[in-house]
Image (cartoon, rainbow, N blue to C red):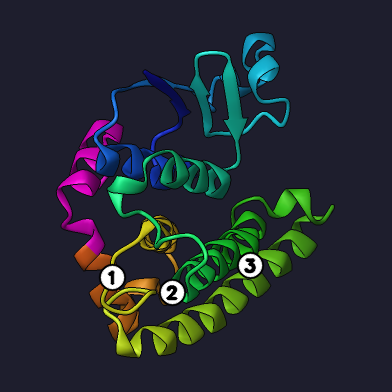
Amino acid sequence: MYKLFYAPGGANMAPHAALEEIGAPHELIRVDLAKGEHRDAAYLRLNPHARVPTLVDGDFVMYESAAIVMHLADRHPESGLAPAPGTPERGHWYQWLLYLSNTPQDAFMQYFHPDSYAFTPEAQAQVKTMAERRIGGMWERLDAALASGPYLLGECFSGCDLYLHMLARWSRNMARPALAYPNLKRCVELVGARPAVVRMMQAEGIG
């Protein structure tokens, strides 16, 4: 029985959807960020970085959303979350998953938490504006990559599409969200219609 510590709509969305895709028994444990539960001593023993998600499987504990998706794909190869190891498709799977976690996700951190990157309100506003501009450029490149889609690996759905779906939702209140780009919109809507993703969204109480 996996345990996934989560906050609704947080970086847990992709690993949560992966658990649903796999069909693995799991328990969701909500971490109330507004109440500071991510900084409680008990949680910090699991994840000293005070973030969600955290995955627990017996005595095994790990964090970092992309790493959890990778781990689940390896633990459950029958799920189809990742292509076979050693194939070119697997290489591109690593490429996209790490790109999404290292580049757009980092820019979203600046967008949502500009106070962690600048001292004054004016400078923080500039950080947020620049982050949104950078994300727009990333959407353009991803939209171009999806032209031959419908998924990041072409015709085959994989775990990296779950990650893209998560990031796209984070952009929903931006001036030009991911769904403003036609190929991104097609991919995100296909992923969003998957029964596993629908179950994830319902369980987290998000739309």
Q: State the residue lying farthest toward the front.
A: 86
**Disc 3: which residue:** 103
Residue 35, position as x, y percentages in the image: 55, 19
Q: CA distance from mark 1 to mark 3?
A: 23 Å
Q: x%, y% of residue 200?
A: 27, 39
Which mark sits nearer the N-terminus, 1 or 3? 3
In the picture, the quarter occupied by the N terminus is top left
Residue placed most toward the observer, 97 or 52: 97
Q: Amino acid at mark 1?
A: Cys
Residue toward you, 120 or 136: 136
Q: Mark 1 to mark 2: distance in Å?
A: 30 Å
Tell which of 161 and 184 is nearer to you.
161
Q: Amino acid at mark 3?
A: Thr
Q: Specify the label residue 175 is tagged with.
A: 2
Q: Residues within 10 Å of mark 3 (few under 14, many from 20)?
A: few
Element carrying mark 3: loop
Residue 46 vs 55, above or below: the answer is above
Could you classify mark 2 by the number of other residues whose Cα lies within 10 Å: few (under 14), some (14-19), or many (20 or more)? few
* Side of 173 where 31 appears, left or right: right
- Badge number at residue 156: 1
Q: Which region is colored magenta?
A: 191-207
Mark 1, mark 3: which one is toward the viewer? 1
